[in-house]
Amino acid sequence: MSKGKMAAQCAHAAILCFQKAQCSANKETQEILELWLASGQPKIVLRVGGHNDLITLQEEAEKLGILAVIVYDAGHTQLDAGTATVLGIGPDKNSKINKLVSHLNLL
């Protein structure tokens, strides 16, 4: 993916995670979302090895109770329709997210 395409996919992930958190009936999720909004909506982009890593991270996030959403491309530009591009994680407590992604490098 080009840098612009990557940026767009990351933006999709941030929006999808926000929407999923906003729709949650869980009180703790709502409190975390409020803190995330109040702190400037921090986002970090990390590199994974490929599709299998996205799936594994999503499964691990779900086991830890962390919100996670895979973005699938629509196929209008550079990628085939249905290609998994990025995984949005959170918002959640830094300590929980760090357990999940501390082994990954910045993009």
Image: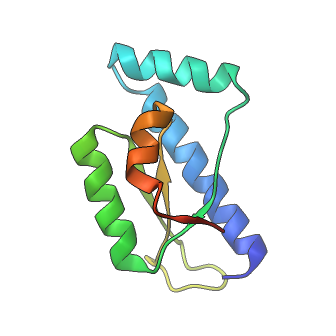
Q: In front: 97, or 62?
A: 97
Q: Can you say whether 21 is above or below 63 in the image?
A: above
Residue 90 shown left or right of residue 75 in the figure: left
Q: Can you say whether 56 is above or below 23 in the image?
A: below
Residue 56 shown left or right of residue 95 in the figure: left
Q: Position of residue 32 (x, y in %)?
A: 49, 22
Query: Residue drawn 65% across and 45% down?
Result: 43
Residue 57 shown left or right of residue 11 in the figure: left
Query: Residue drawn 56% across and 79% down?
Result: 75
Q: Can you say whether 49 is above or below 43 in the image?
A: below
Location of residue 76 (image quadrant): bottom right
Q: Position of residue 62 (x, y in %)?
A: 27, 46
Total residue callouts: 0
Location of residue 52 (image quadrant): bottom left
Residue found at the very far front of the displayed protein = 103
Q: Can you say whether 107 is above or below 64 in the image?
A: below
Q: Position of residue 66 (x, y in %)?
A: 35, 40
Query: Residue drawn 48% across and 26% down?
Result: 22
Residue 24 shown left or right of residue 78 in the figure: left
Q: In front: 101, or 33?
A: 101
- Colouring scheme, one of rainbow, by chain, secondary structure, one colour: rainbow
User: Quadrant location of the N terminus?
Assistant: bottom right
Location of residue 77 (image quadrant): bottom right
